[in-house]
Image (cartoon, rainbow, N blue to C red):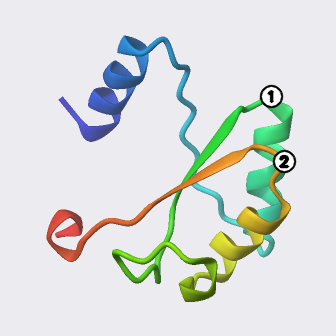
Amino acid sequence: PTRRSSDLAVADGYGVRLHATRVRTRAPAAAILADAASRNAEVIVLGATGLKPPSIRRRDWVDPIAREVARLATQRVMFIHETERAAA
């Protein structure tokens, strides 16, 4: 099974609907927030670069899209930081 199918299976097991999107635009934070609003999303889960584990303090975030989504979202926002080993 692909990673996407396993993610869907986990979400389904918890009774959660999962929608994955790759955003390609000059204003990605606005597109992410608009998509979440149009789907009445309760949570935005976003892969973010530039986080300095184990710190999750906002001032440590280097990723400008992550900062903007966190600042403007009305939904809960969860950021996922892949380790180098997991990303390889």
Q: Where 29 sits versus 34, above or below?
A: below
Element marked by disc 2: loop
- Residue 52: assigned label: none
Amino acid type assigned to the residue bearing label 1 in the image: Asn
- Residue sitting at 85 percent across and 34 percent down? 38
Which numbered disc, 2 or 1, marks the residue that appears first in the sequence?
1
Q: Where 60 sits versus 72, above or below?
A: below
Where is mark 2, residue-wise?
74
Q: Is residue 36 left or right of residue 1?
A: right
Q: Where 71 sits versus 76, above or below?
A: below
Q: Position of residue 41 (x, y in %)?
A: 73, 32
- Quadrant where the image shows the C terminus: bottom left
Give the foreground label among 2 and 1.
2
Element marked by disc 1: loop
Q: Position of residue 49 (x, y in %)?
A: 47, 77
Amino acid type assigned to the residue bearing label 2 in the image: Thr
- Residue sitting at 84 percent across and 47 percent down? 74
- Quadrant where the image shows the N terminus: top left
Decide: few, some or many residues near mark 2? Use Cα within 10 Å; few <14, some 14-19, many ≥20: some
Q: Is residue 34 left or right of residue 18?
A: right
Label 2 and label 1: CA atoms lie apart by 11 Å
Q: Position of residue 75 (x, y in %)?
A: 76, 43
Q: 39 or 68, which lies in front?
A: 68
- Residue sitting at 14 percent across and 71 percent down? 85
Where is mark 1, residue-wise?
40
Q: Position of residue 77 (x, y in %)?
A: 64, 51
